[in-house]
């Protein structure tokens, strides 16, 4: 039975602290998306600088001085999303953001790293006595070795030091199931691996919110549905939800015993509950996102009109969420945007996302009206800021990273292969995708020589392999830690039998059904080729007559032995046909397959070259 979190009073309220703020100057590059400013009286002065929050059943915490005056009070909302345990600066394209200049040229900026994120957030809070920090989910899961090896305890410790106040759950918070999520919230040693340090694990200082995740047996939310930040009479409620489709993109074991409800219905339900409690200023933390028209973080999302520059699920959600909600902090798509999307009453409302991996943070000003208890929407301003690496590192975060790196080093620094250049994960068909599929095919044939091909889901490839050394291993050396960052899920390699007709159907499911709007193109092993015609729609985009295996057409009636990971073998990512295979044979984890392939097929004298990524012919 899925575990539920302990009461907020025991798990969250036990420690609220403010870490030392660095004095370094951190002028972040920014883009501003703002509603039309209204002429408002000056914000009230306040004497204190503490933080306090409440959940259902909480008492109002201490913090902040008395004597605030004036009708309007600016509240700073700092937010980020999809950190995925990236404590160290992410490498390659995962560690850069694109800035659009006025002349139309673009610039890539190195970004991210918890040591820099801490400095930027602490600098941003200076002079903002009413400041709250929130996140949009996927703080953990699919994490690099420094966090993933220790079941993401290092990331929770880092978030505590970052003074995160509240976050929604994301789909990756369920990678290891509800009981493990409860442990991250409440603390305690891992039930299998035990304690990693003599101090034990204390859990999160902040509440995880899961309003639309229900325990199937009780029908109640797995975790608190909302949390209220309070200071000197100012009250802002936060409702947290993850995408309803979480069971489609997480292993079945991770969501066993849970149901995931509609995001809009859930937010509206709890917005009304908060209103009845006298909380009229509300922010929704939604782990679902959209797709901006430009990859530049400072792209004007409101050009030519409000919200016109973003599409996808969040645009639909934002248009339906109750007008009682004043802003939406979103995530999941790893995109960057600051948009004003009208609510159902036609009023403008801020919707933001700060990309991923700690490369950006969003700074939003919510002007609180003490007379009404609501946000003066016409005064809301928001901006995405780059977490640049030209500021001093936060010493406390450096110490944390050094501590966990020392524990991980004996495992992570081991060389497992050599490459002659960057092997990237980017593209419809990627060089790294081809490499991983080939590794799984070779591993599959070691289990069963009759294995014909391998298929890899693109979402399971979390980072590129970069030629430049990440530490002291030397250029071109692939370490176990780097391999772990690429494939951190510990999925097994599974062999199954499919008919040719089923194999063709599986390929068509890349671009049809739940994947029609946002295709998920499988990475294919050597020998499998076909044409993907993006000028067509739906399943027709996979040209059936073009599908070949080793130059031969697929025979509908023949049987093919296919290697996939356990996630795909369970029908994940909308590939229901891949969940219907027979003759199952389960091997070791997919990282083992990648390690064996790199070790067998590369050396310092003969490094592996990036694959050509020429197996899928794309027509646009």
Image: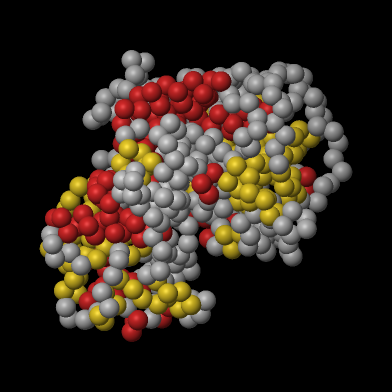
Scheme by which the image is coloured: secondary structure
Of 81 and 554, nearer the camera is: 554
Q: In which quadrant will I find the N terminus?
A: top left
Picture coordinates of residue 541, whole percent (x, y): 43, 78
Q: Is residue 601 left or right of residue 558?
A: right
Q: Is residue 559 left or right of residue 182?
A: left
Residue at 63% x, 37% y is 388
Of 336 and 247, nearer the camera is: 336
616 above or below 593? below
Q: Is residue 544 visible?
A: yes
Residue 576 occupies quadrant: bottom left
Residue 104 occupies quadrant: bottom right
Residue at 42% x, 74% y is 617
Q: Is residue 404 left or right of residue 273?
A: left
Picture coordinates of residue 57, whole percent (x, y): 49, 29
Q: Residue furthest bottom?
A: 545
Q: Residue furthest top?
A: 198
Of 336 and 25, nearer the camera is: 25
Residue 149 occupies quadrant: top left
Picture coordinates of residue 133, whole percent (x, y): 60, 34
Residue at 62% x, 34% y is 389
Of 456 and 61, nearer the camera is: 456
Picture coordinates of residue 257, whole percent (x, y): 29, 47
Residue at 71% x, 44% y is 30
Q: Is residue 537 visible?
A: no
The mark total stands at 0
Q: Is residue 445 left or right of residue 138?
A: left
């Amino acid at each position: 039975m899925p575990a539920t979190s302990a009461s907020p009073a025991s798990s969250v309220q036990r420690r609220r602290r403010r870490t030392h703020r660095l004095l370094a100057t951190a002028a972040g590059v920014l883009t501003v998306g703002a509603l039309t400013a209204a002429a408002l009286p000056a914000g009230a002065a306040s004497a204190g600088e503490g933080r306090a929050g409440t959940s259902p059943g909480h008492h109002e915490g201490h913090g902040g001085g008395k004597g605030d005056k004036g009708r309007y009070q600016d509240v700073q909302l700092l937010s980020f999303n999809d950190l995925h345990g990236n404590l160290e600066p992410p490498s390659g394209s995962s560690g850069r953001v694109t800035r659009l200049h006025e002349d139309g040229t673009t610039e890539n900026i190195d970004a991210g790293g918890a040591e820099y994120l801490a400095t930027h957030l602490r600098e941003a809070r200076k002079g903002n006595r009413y400041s709250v920090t929130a996140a949009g989910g996927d703080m953990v899961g699919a994490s690099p070795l420094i966090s993933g090896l220790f079941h993401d305890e290092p990331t929770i410790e880092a978030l505590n030091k970052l003074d995160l106040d509240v976050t929604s759950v994301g789909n990756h918070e369920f990678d290891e199931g509800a009981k493990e999520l409860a442990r991250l919230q409440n603390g305690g040693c891992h039930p299998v691996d035990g304690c990693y340090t003599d101090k034990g694990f204390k859990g999160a200082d902040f509440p995880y919110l899961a309003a639309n995740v229900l325990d199937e047996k009780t029908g109640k939310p797995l975790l608190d549905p909302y949390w209220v930040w309070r200071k000197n009479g100012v009250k802002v409620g936060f409702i947290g939800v993850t995408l309803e489709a979480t069971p489609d993109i997480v292993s079945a074991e991770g969501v066993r015993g849970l149901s995931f409800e509609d995001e809009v219905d859930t937010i509206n339900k709890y917005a009304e509950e908060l209103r009845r409690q006298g909380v009229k200023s509300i922010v929704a933390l939604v782990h679902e996102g959209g797709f901006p028209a430009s990859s530049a973080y400072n792209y004007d999302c409101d050009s030519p009109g409000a919200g016109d520059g973003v599409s996808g699920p969040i645009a639909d959600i934002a248009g339906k969420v109750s007008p009682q909600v004043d802003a939406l902090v979103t995530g999941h798509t790893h995109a960057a945007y600051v948009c004003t999307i009208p609510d159902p009453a036609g009023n403008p409302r801020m919707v933001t996302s700060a990309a991923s991996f700690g490369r950006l943070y969003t700074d939003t000003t919510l002007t609180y009206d003490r007379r009404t208890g609501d946000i003066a929407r016409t005064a809301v301003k928001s901006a995405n800021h780059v977490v640049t690496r030209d500021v001093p590192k936060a010493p406390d975060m450096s110490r944390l990273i050094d501590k966990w790196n020392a524990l991980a080093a004996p495992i992570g620094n081991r060389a497992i292969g050599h490459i002659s250049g960057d092997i990237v994960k980017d593209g419809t068909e990627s060089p790294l995708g081809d490499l991983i599929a080939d590794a799984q095919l070779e591993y599959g044939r070691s289990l069963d020589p009759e294995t014909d091909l391998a298929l890899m889901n693109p979402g399971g490839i979390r980072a590129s392999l970069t030629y430049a050394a990440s530490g002291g291993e030397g250029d071109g050396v692939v370490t176990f830690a780097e391999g772990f960052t690429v494939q951190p899920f510990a999925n097994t390699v599974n062999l199954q039998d499919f008919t040719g007709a089923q194999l063709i159907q599986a390929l068509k499911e890349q671009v049809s059904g739940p994947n029609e709007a946002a295709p998920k193109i499988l990475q294919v092993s050597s020998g499998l080729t076909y044409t993907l015609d993006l000028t067509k729609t739906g399943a027709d985009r996979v040209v059936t007559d073009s599908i070949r295996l080793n130059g031969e057409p697929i025979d509908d009636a023949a049987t093919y032995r296919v290697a996939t990971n356990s996630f795909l073998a369970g029908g994940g990512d909308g590939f229901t046909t891949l969940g219907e295979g027979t003759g199952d044979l389960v091997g070791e984890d997919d990282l083992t397959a990648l390690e064996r392939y790199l070790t067998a097929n590369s050396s310092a004298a003969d490094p592996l070259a990036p694959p050509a990524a020429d197996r899928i012919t794309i027509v646009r």
